[in-house]
Amino acid sequence: MDKIGPFFLPVLVLLIVIFGFTRKVQIFDVFVEGAKDGLESTFYIIPSLIGLITSINMIKASGALDVFTSFIAPFANKVGIPVKTIPLFLLRPISGSGSMAFINHIFSSCGPDSFVGRVTSVMMGSTETTFYAIAVYFGSVGIKNTRHTIPSALCADLTGFLMSILLVKLLF
Amino acid sequence: MMNYIFGALFVISVISAIITGRLEEVSNSILSGTNEAVKLTISLLGMMCFWTGIMKIADKGGITILLANFFSPVMRLLFPDYKKTSPAIKAICMNITANFLGLGNAATPMGIAAMKEMQRENPKKEIANNSMAMFVIINTASIQLIPTTMAILRKVHGSTSPFDVMPCVWISSAVALLIGIISAKILEKRG
């Protein structure tokens, strides 16, 4: 991956720009329009990030996070799950900005290229905010009984988490 | 749910700060946390805008429709209740493709459109049918070609190669999706 890494982004951008040209897209105008969407959605997350990064910082500073991790450490170690990833495991299906705030804490305390940093990156990239998606989609049509949706979706989430740990152990 | 978690975080941290005598640290963490949140968003902003701009070019060029056709045979296997030409299948394909490309803003309205199409033929309006459940499960285990936010966040924190975890992300989400689909197929028979 070290060899492909630097090529990835420029080549992808090149391909998309050529694709746009051949399809007669006004690429600059459309780029600006798209960037505005990004501006809007990035600014939109500021309020929730302020709330969540602050509360996660408080939990960390108060020592409660250490108590929590040392409490579950024996169990997690037995199964082979890195203790520091457990809060993300609990937060990820419920809140997108919450897990982003937690990952921010992991990256600044352990570094993004550490083992835990990589595992949390893969967890974040390969799972979704499950309960949010369920609420939005079923809510939009007034479904009350979601039947097997939640068990199956959580099954997939659990698989994603365990696979993240396994794959980072194998490939790095 | 989030309201309880948010509240619990504050209550637990203040109580535990009183017990451990770390009130000053907690007080500082409030000031630094708010600052950090704003700084983080600002540092993400440039790359987020650049990326949504580039992806908008791909989208306007019709890449979503091209790929949606490509995904369509697989979708028909997963949603056997709908014909190839049905508007439900079309909306499902568009939503899954948009998610695959990381076009979150575009994906949600298409997903809601897909749900509305499925609801139209649903006999019991308050109970999800198999296709609806399958659709939402696929969405919650969504495969994303380039996990942009995560890569940008890695870069901001000084990662030397922010994209090097991508193969792991692909394999992990593919396996998770597969397990989601299999478990849905097993559980849907139980009613």
Image (tube, rainbow, N blue to C red):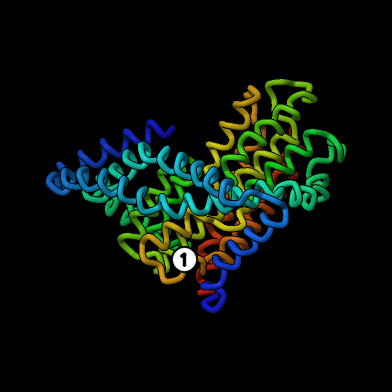
Q: Please name the amino acid that badge 1 sits on.
A: Pro
Residue B148 percent coordinates (x, y):
51, 55
**Nearest the camera: A11 or A66?**
A11
Looking at the rendered image, the quarter that the C terminus of chain B falls into is: top right
Is A29 drawn above or below residue A119 in the view shown? above
Residue A60 visible to an observer of this rendering: yes
Q: Residue B13: horizontal and vertical position, in percent?
A: 24, 42
In this rendering, the answer to whether A136 lies above or below B44 is: above
Q: Is residue A134 left or right of residue B183?
A: left
Q: Residue at x 46, y 66 (%)?
A: B162
> What residue appears at the point 45 percent right and 55 percent down from the top-left corner?
B47
Seen from the viewer's position, the closer of residues A4 and A142 is A4
Q: Is residue A155 visible in the rendered structure shown here?
A: no
- Give the residue at mark 1: B162
At 29% across and 42% down in the image, what residue appears?
A55
The location of residue B173, given as percent across then percent down, is 61, 56
